[in-house]
């Protein structure tokens, strides 16, 4: 799997994370969706990794993903940031996976 982070997305990630220690995860979040195939792509910044997380090196920073959820992602993806919608975007050459992707900062109690 190959992920590229645009300079606009990298700048916003750094701004929002602001030196906090943790790990950037690209999630396929199914909580509250009712079905495993009705998930939402999101970025999470977490204090700890899970045992199922795999490492993906990008052009900007390391990203982690749950191995069991990789089937929902495309082989080549780009994480971008849109100033117009003030949100991150997850794109591939075939499609826009999420045009309004959030960044969730998870604490130890979340």
Image (cartoon, helix red, strand yellow):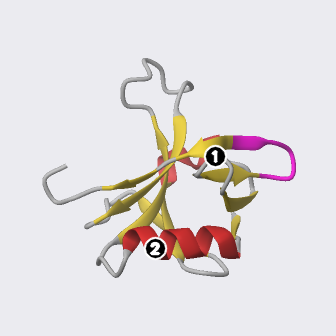
Q: Residues within 10 Å of mark 1 (few under 14, many from 20)?
A: few
Identity of the residue furthest to the right in this view: 93
Residue at horizontal 68 percent and vertical 43 percent from the top: 99
Give the residue number, with chain letter if any, for mark 2. Answer: 15
- Say if residue 80 shows up in the picture: yes
Identity of the residue furthest to the top in this view: 34
Is 36 or 60 nearer to us in this picture? 60
Is 39 or 10 nearer to us in this picture? 10
Residue at horizontal 56 percent and vertical 26 percent from the top: 37
Residue at horizontal 74 percent and vertical 51 percent from the top: 91
Q: Which residues are magenta?
A: 92-97
Q: x, y (%) of residue 21?
A: 29, 78
Residue at horizontal 42 percent and vertical 17 percent from the top: 34
Q: In the image, 86: left or right of 45?
A: right
Give the residue number, with chain letter if any, for mark 1. Answer: 85
Q: Quadrant of residue 18?
A: bottom left
Q: x, y (%) of residue 36?
A: 49, 27
Report the quarter where the N terminus lies.
bottom right
Q: Secondary structure at mark 2?
A: helix
Q: Is residue 99 magenta?
A: no
From mark 2 to mark 1, how far is it between C-alphas? 17 Å
């Amino acid at each position: 799997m190959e992920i590229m982070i645009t300079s606009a997305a990298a700048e916003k990630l750094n701004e929002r994370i602001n030196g906090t220690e943790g790990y950037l995860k690209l999630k396929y979040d199914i909580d509250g969706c009712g079905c495993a195939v009705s998930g939402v792509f999101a970025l999470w910044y977490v204090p700890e990794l899970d045992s199922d997380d795999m490492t993906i090196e990008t052009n900007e920073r390391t990203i982690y993903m749950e191995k069991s959820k990789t089937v929902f992602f495309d082989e080549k993806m780009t994480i971008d940031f849109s100033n117009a919608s003030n949100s991150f975007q997850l794109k591939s050459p075939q499609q826009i996976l999420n045009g309004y992707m959030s960044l969730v900062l998870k604490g130890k109690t979340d």
